[in-house]
Image (cartoon, rainbow, N blue to C red):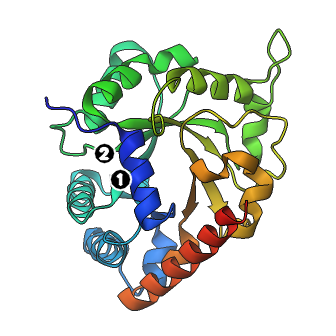
């Protein structure tokens, strides 16, 4: 297996050239209906191809949510494979939003599904859950390094339920979310221009100045658009780390489909607002 250039380096270049916007590919049933599509494999395929056509040559990152493809079984996964292939061919980086987390050989198998360079679903990065212990991610970390891929580890998520785990305080006074950030900073130590191991940190969380977000890695920030956060909120949430933020917008862009031009216009507006907010810091 020939490794790619490290994900962090590729992401930094894509963000500098295209802006940091990440657009989700979330074909849930209600959105398919809004587009006038059936909730079936044909609708799934039409939706995904349209998003790729509209976005893959202009945004830095596309983030398919694998669950919305998996629910159609093997035919849905075939659509996901094609979506990944076509988006990467057009120049977008793919972050597979699968939130995998397990131990030992099972974690290794999940890693091979998404992070092995020859896998049909090979993605530039994968979202993972560390809540079986950060060390349980070791197989995914090792394979990501080998293949030039990256990870986004759930650290401070935007869903209200996450707080009961992520804000729990460990012996010594550091909470779980801060512990995950510290692990990631260690993974990325010395990497230039950006480490490949990022954190998922919600854009809706308000002032996070009590956390050290300077992990020398990317911060995937869901919550902009339908969940209530705006690009203008980013500096207040992320402070000096805002340059490494990858803001994710899904429904805020996708609701403008199925017209390709309207999707592009919406993404361009978000991208410009994000660029202005980041440059103001």
Tag on residue 172? none
Question: Which residue sits furthest top?
Answer: 171
Residue beneath the point at 32% across and 70% down: 48
Residue at which label 2 appears: 123
Cα separation, mark 1 vs mark 2, equals: 5 Å
| Place of residue 202 in the rendered image (x, y in percent of width and height, measured from the top left) | 68, 50
Mark 1 or mark 2: whose residue is earlier in sequence = 1
Residue beneath the point at 59% across and 69% down: 275
On the picture, is 281 further left or further right than 101? right
- Which quadrant of the structure image shows residue 119? top left
| Place of residue 246 in the rendered image (x, y in percent of width and height, measured from the top left) | 55, 54
Q: Nearer the viewer, residue 17 or 217?
A: 17
Quadrant position of the C terminus in the picture: bottom right
Residue 263 showing in the rendered view = yes
Report if the CB atoms under discs 1 and 2 are less than 8 Å apart.
yes
Residue 27 showing in the rendered view = no
Tag on residue 94? 1
Residue beneath the point at 48% across and 86% down: 265
Instruction: Judge the density around disc 1: few (<14), some (14-19), many (≥20) Cα neighbours within 10 Å.
Output: many
Q: Secondary structure at mark 2?
A: loop
Please, is residue 75 above or below residue 168 in the view? Answer: below
């Amino acid at each position: 297996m020939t490794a790619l250039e490290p994900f962090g380096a590729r992401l930094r270049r894509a963000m500098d050239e295209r802006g940091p916007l990440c657009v989700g590919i979330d074909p849930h049933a209600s959105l398919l209906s809004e587009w006038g599509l059936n909730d079936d494999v044909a609708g799934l395929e039409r939706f995904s191809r349209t998003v790729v056509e509209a976005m893959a040559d202009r945004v830095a990152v596309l983030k398919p949510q694998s669950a919305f493809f998996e629910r159609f079984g093997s035919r849905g996964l075939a659509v996901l494979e094609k979506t990944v292939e076509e988006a990467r061919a057009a120049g977008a980086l793919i972050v597979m939003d699968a939130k995998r987390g397990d131990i030992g050989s099972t974690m290794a198998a999940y890693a091979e599904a998404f992070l092995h360079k020859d896998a049909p679903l090979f993605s530039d990065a994968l979202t993972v859950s560390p809540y079986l212990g950060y060390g349980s991610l070791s197989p995914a970390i090792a394979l990501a390094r080998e293949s030039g891929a990256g990870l986004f580890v759930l650290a401070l998520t935007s869903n209200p339920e996450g707080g009961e785990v992520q804000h729990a305080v460990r012996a010594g006074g550091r909470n779980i979310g801060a512990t995950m950030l510290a692990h990631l900073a260690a993974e990325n130590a010395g990497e230039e221009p950006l480490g490949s191991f990022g954190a998922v940190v919600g854009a809706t969380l308000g002032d996070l100045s009590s956390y050290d977000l300077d992990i020398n890695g990317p911060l995937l920030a869901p919550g902009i658009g339908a969940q209530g956060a705006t690009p203008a909120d980013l500096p207040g949430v992320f402070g000096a780390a805002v340059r490494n933020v990858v803001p994710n917008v899904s429904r805020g862009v996708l609701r403008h489909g199925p017209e390709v031009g309207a999707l592009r216009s919406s993404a361009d507006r978000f991208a410009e607002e994000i660029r202005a907010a980041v440059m103001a810091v």
